[in-house]
DNA sequence: TAGATTGTTAATCGATTAACAATC
DNA sequence: TAGATTGTTAATCGATTAACAATC
């Protein structure tokens, strides 16, 4: 699956949308879908969908459309979801707790294999089937369980320190909810989620829409 | 603040980043910052920052830089944060609970004025200073409190129904965590947050990075 | 004034849209 | 075969980067 050209982030971010809808179609017993119909369902142009998919190969049948289950499988392999990545969550506050119980992660093949916190009231509790361990033991657990992806939902003040420990323990990717830029080695992939951007965009839109 | 041309989403999404860092600078007692220095801190090119800001006016001083507190104030007004928007959250599961306690929202001027759920074990509880009310009363509360922005953290199955009720009650913007496309009138702004995209991107990156 | 840094214009780059030949 | 729909090439659009004149 080596590509000549780097695939843009925009394409990568649309793949999970396609995948989720294809699963729904599959559940509904629909075997074939055209880019036209899929685009309608998702609010994306059919040209865009076809263009995105051809970054990775020719999965459709001309004059027919795409076989739903086949395309599902292709996208799984493109994203790499067949790997069943193991994730660990540091900071089991409300947000960490919510993510530990987030069904969609499991449905995509991610397995929660470690939950870490400093709070003694939380350590030892079973959250979504996993027992919270002291963050002091995090590196050991990451190594023993073979956790590849870390999620950081700690306060910003300790996020960098937690990230450092994750990297030391061999984590390859970090999904951070802390509102700051983490410094990590080049080969570590960091994706930052900023929950306040959505609200800010809504505020901007509501403030400026009347003036059009 | 009428603009000739629509401002791109990319610009709007960077404004909150600038704002957050400017607040930190302000706390640190720094009065003036150049686009060069700010860019370094944020991992954004100085040209990009200057270009973004000039979409809205000329806020800097040539040969000097930007006055931190002045720029802060400008961005607040551009985004519309001085309005102190009232928000209501429907679905007080783990994620809704986390958002109700999310400090950053308050720091940006958003005020939680309503929490709604169907679960009798949750109704009546005080979450982050607000008592959870039955979702059956949501429309009344939205109207009485003058809530303008709704956050949806319900299961996908009821998200559309909740959105409909929010719109009926006069909500203008919706921030949805439900993994589906909501159908709303044209004048309602919907921003969808998809927490699984981050993990999918990490999976894609880890799967494909070795082959470069 | 000299040095620094903005705001703006031009050049480049990349992503989306449109058009259509290939083909099921 | 005729109709439908893909995959691909070309055209358009928009965003980022570079360059530099304006000016504090």
Image (cartoon, coloured by chain):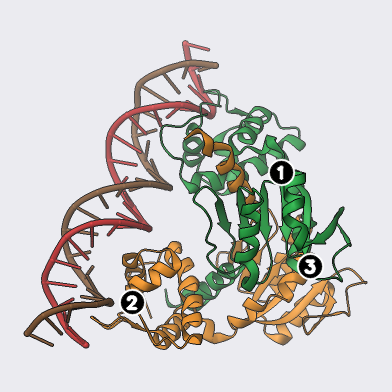
Chain colours: A green, B orange, C brown, D red
Residue drawn 51% across and 76% down? B20
The image quarter in which residue A150 lies: bottom right
Label 3, label 1: how many angstroms apart (C-alpha)? 23 Å
Q: Is residue B193 among what the camera can see?
A: no
Crowding near the residue tagged with mark 2, few <14, some 14–19, many ≥20 C-alpha atoms within 10 Å: many
Q: Which mark is residue B91?
A: 3
- Mark 1 belongs to chain: A
Callouts 3 and 1 close, C-beta under 8 Å: no
Horizontal side of residue A32 vs C2, given as left or right: right
Label 3, label 2: how many angstroms apart (C-alpha)? 43 Å
Residue drawn 39% across and 68% down? B39
The location of residue A87, given as percent across then percent down, is 72, 49
Question: Pointer 2: what residue?
Answer: B34
Label 2, label 1: how many angstroms apart (C-alpha)? 44 Å
Residue drawn 40% across and 67% down? B40
The location of residue B51, given as percent across then percent down, is 32, 68
Q: Is residue A91 among what the camera can see?
A: yes
- Identify the secondary structure beneath mark 1: loop
Horizontal side of residue B127 vs A6, given as left or right: right
Callouts 3 and 2 close, C-beta under 8 Å: no
Q: Are marks 2 and 1 on the same chain?
A: no
């Amino acid at each position: 699956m080596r590509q000549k050209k780097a695939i843009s982030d925009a394409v990568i971010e649309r793949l999970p949308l396609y995948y989720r809808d294809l699963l729904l179609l599959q559940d509904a017993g629909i075997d074939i879908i055209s880019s036209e119909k899929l685009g309608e369902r998702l609010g994306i142009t059919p040209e865009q969908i076809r263009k995105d998919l051809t970054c990775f190969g020719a999965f459709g049948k001309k004059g027919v459309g795409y076989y739903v289950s086949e395309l599902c499988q292709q996208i799984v392999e493109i994203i790499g979801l067949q790997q069943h990545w193991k994730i660990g969550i540091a900071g089991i506050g409300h947000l960490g707790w919510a993510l530990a119980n987030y069904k969609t992660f499991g449905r995509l093949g991610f397995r929660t294999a470690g939950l870490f916190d400093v709070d003694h009231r939380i350590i030892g509790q079973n959250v979504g089937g996993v027992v919270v361990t002291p963050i002091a033991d995090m590196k050991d657990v990451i190594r023993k369980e073979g956790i590849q992806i870390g999620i950081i939902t700690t306060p910003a003040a300790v996020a960098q320190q937690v990230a450092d420990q994750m990297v030391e323990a061999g984590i390859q990717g970090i999904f951070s909810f802390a509102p700051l830029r983490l410094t990590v080695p080049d080969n570590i992939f960091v994706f930052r989620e900023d929950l306040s951007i959505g609200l800010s965009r809504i505020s901007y839109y509501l403030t400026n829409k009347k003036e059009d």
